[in-house]
Image (cartoon, grey):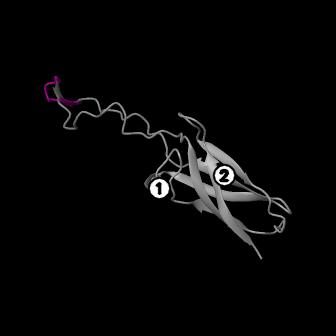
Amino acid sequence: MGSQGTALLDFGVFPGASDAIVAVTGQAGILAGSLAEAWIFPAATADHSADEHLVETLQVFAGNVVAGTGFTVYGVNSSQLNEPVEVAPPSSVMHENGTAVIVKNAQPAAKAYGGGAGTRLYGKWNLGWVWN
């Protein structure tokens, strides 16, 4: 015997947070040894479209089962910040006569950052859950 349902995981107003939790309660039949599972449920919320639910870097995990009560769903943004790209300095070549000649680096100029992504999400996201 188990149960299933949906919940809203709320990262708060913009700029949001890197993680969020939601308690699923009212599960009188859940046992300490029950297994709970959660996933992103692609349905629009006031903050995000169903498509955003499909492509966002959001992972959810169910745990902390409390017998006769419920469990907790943890949401984490799995994106990461990229370090700044370092541009290689120009190469120098030493000639036989001891003089150095600077040779322009063949590497194209790099951007200040390599397209890093933020670690925060905002707003409400739909979850599906089940326990057994």
Q: Looking at the image, which residue is at 60% across and 57% down? A: 127
In the rendered image of this protein, does residue 113 appear above or below residue 9?
Answer: above
Residue situated in front as seen by the camera: 102 or 48: 48
Q: Looking at the image, which residue is at 80% across and 63% down? A: 27
In the rendered image of this protein, does residue 85 appear above or below residue 59?
Answer: above
Total marks in image: 2
Q: Amino acid at mark 2?
A: Tyr
Residue 47 pos. (x, y %): 51, 44
- Asked which quadrant contains residue 39, the reply is bottom right
Marks 1 and 2, Cα distance to the nearest angstrom? 20 Å
Give the secondary structure at mark 2. Answer: strand
**According to the image, label 2 marks what residue?**
74
Q: Earlier in the sequence, mark 1 or mark 2?
A: 1
Inspect this view and state whether residue 131 appears. Answer: no
- Outermost residue toward the right? 68
- Outermost residue toward the front? 46
Nearest to the eye among marks 1 and 2: give it.
1
Residue 84 pos. (x, y %): 40, 33
Magenta stretch: give its range. Answer: 91-100
Q: Looking at the image, which residue is at 69% across and 50% down? A: 22
Q: Is residue 32 left or right of residue 96?
A: right
Q: Amino acid at mark 1?
A: Ala
Give the secondary structure at mark 1. Answer: helix
**According to the image, label 1 marks what residue?**
50
Residue situated in front as seen by the camera: 21 or 77: 21
The C terminus, quarter of image: bottom right
Q: Is residue 96 magenta?
A: yes
Residue situated in front as seen by the camera: 94 or 112: 112
Residue 50 pos. (x, y %): 47, 56
**Which of the labelled discs sits on residue 36, or is there none?**
none
Q: Is residue 94 left or right of residue 14?
A: left
Q: Residues within 10 Å of mark 1 (few under 14, many from 20)?
A: some
